Amino acid sequence: MKILLVYPGYPDTFWSFKHALRFVRKKATFPPLGLLTVGAMLPEEWEKKLVDLNTTTLKDEDLEWADYVFLSAMIAQQDSAREVIDRCRRLGTRIVAGGPFFKRGYEDSGFEGIDHLIFGEAEAVLPLLVEDLEKGCARHIYASEEFPDIRKTPVPLWQLINRNEYQFMSIQYSRGCPFNCEFCDIVILNGRRPRTKDQSQLVAELDALYDMGWRGGVFFVDDNFIGNRRKLKSEILPAVIRWMEDRGRPFTFFMEASINLADDDELMRLMAAAGFDMVFVGIESPNEESLVECNKSHNNKRDLLAAVKKMQNYGLQVQGGFIVGFDSDPLSIFKSQIDFIQKSGIVTAMVGLLNAPPGTRLYKRLKKENRILSVGSGDNTDGSTNLVPKMGRDILVNGYKHVVDTIYAPKQHYARIRTFLREYRPGNKGKFRISPVYLTALIRSTWALGCREKGRIHYWKLVIWTLLKRPRAFPLSIALAVQGFHFRKVAEKVRVPQSGDISGLEQMREPLDRHG
C-alpha cells in the first residue's frame, strides 16, 4: 500500500501565528501529531508520505502516487479539507478521513466523496480498517464509542516531517478531561476519565524528539494535562526531571490545564523543575453567573486574578481563553473582560464568541430553544457564532470587536507584558544566548514594530523598560511583542454588523472608550 497522509491548511486564526512566524522564518507552529501517530500505527511495510498544507503544497503527482489518502482535520480546517476531497475525487484517489471535523453531527458538512469514514479514536478502529483494506473489502464507515487504552499507542513517525519548518514540536501524554463544561466537546471526543501513557512511553517519545535533533519548545497537547495529578507527581514529572537533567535540559514544555493547578504548590514546583514555563487556562469569564451557566464550577467562587498571579510566580506564563456571549453576560461584560485581562498580565489572551459544537450539552439545549444557526466555522475568534445570542448578535459582535481591538492594541498589549514580567519568576535564570535566528528575528521585528507600526512609541517604552527592569526576560518580552503584531492582524479581519438591532450598544460605549 502507498499511503499519503494529508493535513489541511489552517485559515489565518489566533493560534496560527502566521504573522509572527515570518519573523523567525518558520512555516507552521506545530506539526500534525495525530497523522504522524496514525502513520506509526499503519503496517511498517506500507509506504508513507506526509503533506502538511501549512508548510507545502499538494501536487497531483502526490495524489496519483497514493493508493489511499488519509485525511485528518479540525473544524477550522474544513474549507481546505473540502478542497483536498474535491481533488481526490477528480483524480480518482480513494480517501480515508477521520479527526474532529469528521465526526457524528457533521455529516451535512461535505463528506460526500469520502470512501471510508472513521468515527472515533484510531486505536479503536484502525486495526480493523487495515485488515479490510488488505482484503479489499473495506466498509464505508468505521465507528467506535470506545475510549481505548493509549498505553500501546506508538511513537509518532517523526521522520515524515522536516522539523525545521515548525516553531514547536508536540507530544501527547493523556486524553480526556474530568470536567464537563457545557460548551466543550472534549468529553464527547475523549471522555471524562483521563487516560494516560506510561512513563516508559513518555520517555521514548522524548528520546525520539531528541534523537531527531530537536532543541526547543514542546507542547503537550493533552485536553487537561493535570487530569491525573497523582500520577504526574509520583511518576511522570520526576521521570521528566531526570531525563532533562541527563540531557542538559534541551526542551522547554508548555501545556493546557484547568485553573485548579493554582491549588497545588507541589505540582507547580515539579513542573518548573521539569522545564514547564507556560500554561493555557480556560478562564472564560470574570462574571460568576456566566461560569455557573456553563458549568465551569472549578473556576467559580475563586479569586481568578490571584490564581493567575500565583502560577506566574511559579514561573508559568499563563495564556488565557475567554468567551463572550453567554446568556448570563450583562452589557458590562466587554468592559469586565478588558479590565480582567489587563490586570492579570495574561499577554496571550484568546477572546472568542460563544459557539455550540454539535453534540455538546449547549448545542442540545439551544437546539430545543430553536437558537442553533449552523455547524460553525470552528474558529471562535473570527467574529462568527452558530447560535442566537440573548443580547443580540449585533451588540455581541460590536462589543467583541471592541474588546479585541483594545487588548491587542500596542499600548494595552505592551502594558500587559510589563504586568506579566513583574510577576513572572522563571526557574532558569541563566543568561540568554543570542542565536543567529534570534538576532534575525530581533532585527525584523524591531523594523516592523519599532519603525513601521503606529504604536511604535509604546514598543520602545517596552524595550527600554525591559532592559532596565527585567534584562534576562528581554527575548521573552520581544517574542510576546511579536505575538501582539499577529493578534492585531487577526483582529482586523473581524467584521462587525453593518445593520440590525444595536439598541443598548451606546449605553456601554462610554465605559468601553475609557480603555481605548
Image: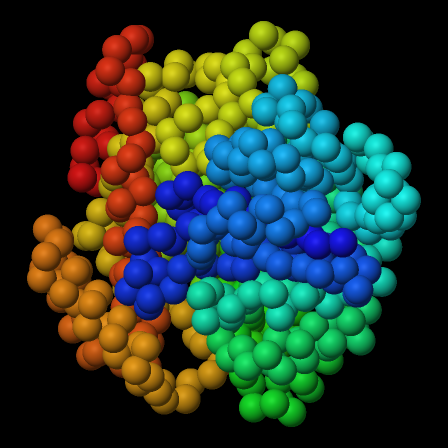
Give residue 255's position: percent from left, percent from top: 57, 61
Q: What x and y, as percent, mark residue 112?
A: 65, 24
Residue 117, percent across and down?
74, 34
* Image quarter of residue 458: bottom left
Q: Nearer the viewer, residue 333 or 377?
A: 377
Tell me how the rendering is colored.
Answer: rainbow
- Residue at the spot x=46%, y=41% of the render? 322
Please give the count of numbered marks on the rendered protein. 0
In this rendered view, identify the residue nearer to me: 21 or 275.
21
**Residue 491 in view of the camera:** yes
Left or right of 278, for residue 294: right
Q: Residue at x 68, y 59 (%)?
A: 48
Q: Quadrant of the C terminus?
A: top left
Q: Using residue 280 as the reference point, say whether residue 467 is left or right of it.
A: left
- Residue 356 location, quadrant: top right
Q: Quadrant of residue 420?
A: bottom left
Front residue of this view, candidates 281 and 291:
281
Residue sitting at 60 percent across and 31 percent down? 89
Q: Nearer the viewer, residue 318 or 40?
A: 40
User: Is 87 above or below relative to 501?
Assistant: below
Q: Position of residue 77 (x, y in %)?
A: 51, 39
In the picture, measured across the screen, residue 122 lies left or right of residue 484, that is: right
Q: Quadrant of the N terminus?
A: bottom right
Vertical arrangement, residue 200 with respect to residue 366, above or below:
below
Q: Is residue 368 above or below residue 207?
A: above
Residue located at (10% from left, 51% from top): 454
Asked if one can make out residue 220 in the rendered structure from this viewpoint, the answer is: no
